Amino acid sequence: MGSELAMFWYETDSPIGRLLLAGDARALQRLYFQAGPRPFAPPAAWRHDAAPFAPVLAQLNDYFAGTRRTFRLPLAPAGTPFQLAVWGALQAIPYGETVAYGQLAQRLGLVNAARAVGLANGSNPIPIIIPCHRVIGADGSLTGFGGGLPIKRSLLSLEGAACVADLFAAAGPRPVPAAARVPRPNGP
């Protein structure tokens, strides 16, 4: 018989919605955002148990409370050597800082690989802990995120990232052009 370890899963609430954790007894392998349009349904063979995730849950609680800036957990993301290199580079982005896809590609010594880095970033199986939310567009804009842009914005805001303060908090409400306003029954 094979020496494959049993897979475990556990769902938990967080300030950004329900999260599903998955891994074996040794390491976290996946983190899913369950509030999206396609929540993950664990296979029947996986075991539902919080115990293997106690350190993950404690560190996530600390992170969301604003008292943890780095995660120290055994991780086992499955990916190609290129993806693993990108995910390793993501872990080097400091808390509260952001980098553009092109900058991340340059850090990896791949000057013209911003798009490939973006694809690897988008397939990160352990978001938040491997902080793919810290990668933004070259113009400072928030770009795609598996959990959705509101969650990305929330994570960056929690960390006090400058792009969030600059793009969202400081901008204030923007007037809606008259042509885009929904007419009210009794007037403009």
Image (cartoon, grey):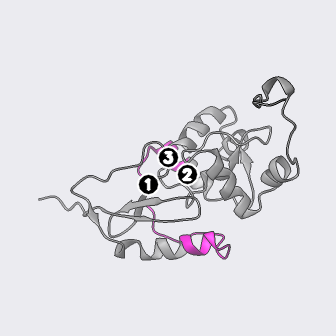
Q: Write down the region rendered in magenta.
A: 60-85
Asked if marks 1 and 2 touch (Cβ < 8 Å), the reply is: yes
Which residue shows up at 75% across the image and 57% down it? 97
Name the image quarter holding the C terminus: top right
Between the C-alphas of marks 1 and 3, the distance is 21 Å
Give the quadrant of residue 71. Answer: bottom right
Q: Secondary structure at mark 1?
A: loop
Q: Earlier in the sequence, mark 3 or mark 2?
A: 3
Which residue shows up at 81% across the image and 49% down it? 168
Which residue shows up at 83% across the image and 53% down it? 169
Magenta-drawn stretch contains 75: yes
Q: Amino acid at mark 1?
A: Pro
Q: Nearer the viewer, residue 148 or 94?
A: 148
Q: Secondary structure at mark 3?
A: loop
Q: Secondary structure at mark 2?
A: helix
Residue 36 shows which numbered tag?
Answer: 3
Q: Amino acid at mark 3?
A: Gly
Determine which residue is flagged by label 1: 77
Q: Position of residue 27 (x, y in %)?
A: 39, 66
Magenta-drawn stretch contains 69: yes
